[in-house]
Amino acid sequence: MIKSVVQAIPTYVMSCFLLSMGLCEHIESMISKFWWGSKQGESKIHWIKWETLCKEKKKGGIGFRTFHEFNLAMLSKQGWRIMHNDDLLISQCLKARYFSRSNFLKASTGYCPSYTWRSIFQARVDVVEKVGIWRVGDGRLINVWEDNWLPYQNGHKIWSHKPPNCDIMFVSDLIHHDIRCWNAPLINEIFLPFEAQQILQLPISFSQLQDEFVWGASRSSTCSVKSSCDFLKARREADGCHSSM
């Protein structure tokens, strides 16, 4: 009943707005009290902490949702739809208001933003920018130093610092477009050896397709609520391990 009814009630709201941490914790507290049993003015002992109950059954939990993570996952799915479906009414409205001269990934919160946009923007920062990765096409949209585009590197970003007086800005600047191959001498000169090796292993499209921003947390390369939740849960567990060391 908790999974199918109680945790499903705020789903629509969480797909549109980012709930405060205090409200999420309050809802989780009420669910926890209901799980362990409570009467008016009397609470029973909670033998296991809520974070443990939210783990998968195979890891010793019950599989309850962590509301803040699920909220961010729902909003990240909305952001992904806006980014890849320009014909949607919400996409057209938000683009006209907040990123008419750029794109979803480069947009800022803007002046006096709506709560809907602030919510989706936060999910973009916390989830979409961390999980999404650029698939190299012609390289004209990918910023070498700022964007995620190395698939086999933690964080997918270049770790090397931009050399002084270096004019390289986009991935297209690293490609010989006439013969459709990487500029190996330039790449080996600018980047660390393990980064240069990764770059040179990336395939280059002979048809010069446009660069594509894909979801790096699932085989389908498409954002899903489950994959977003899995990413946030893994990050929380990793942060917990680091803090306990």
Image: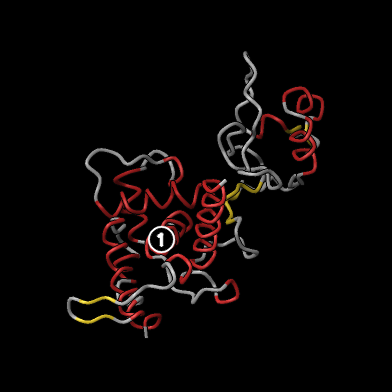
Q: Amino acid at mark 1?
A: Gln
Vertical arrangement, residue 175 with respect to residue 224, above or below: above
Q: Position of residue 237 (x, y in %)?
A: 54, 56
Question: Can you identify the residue that label 1 sits on?
Answer: 78
Tally the marks.
Answer: 1
Q: Which residue: 22% across, 41% down?
A: 112
Vertical arrangement, residue 41 with respect to residue 66, above or below: below
Q: Which residue: 64% across, 32% down?
A: 159
Q: Position of residue 135 (x, y in %)?
A: 65, 48
Residue 29, quarter of the rendered image: bottom left
Q: Which residue: 57% across, 45% down?
A: 245
Q: Which of 90 and 69 lies nearest the eye of the viewer?
A: 69
Circle 1 SS class: helix
Which residue reaches farthest left? 41
Q: Position of residue 44 (x, y in %)?
A: 31, 77
Q: Position of residue 27 (x, y in %)?
A: 29, 68
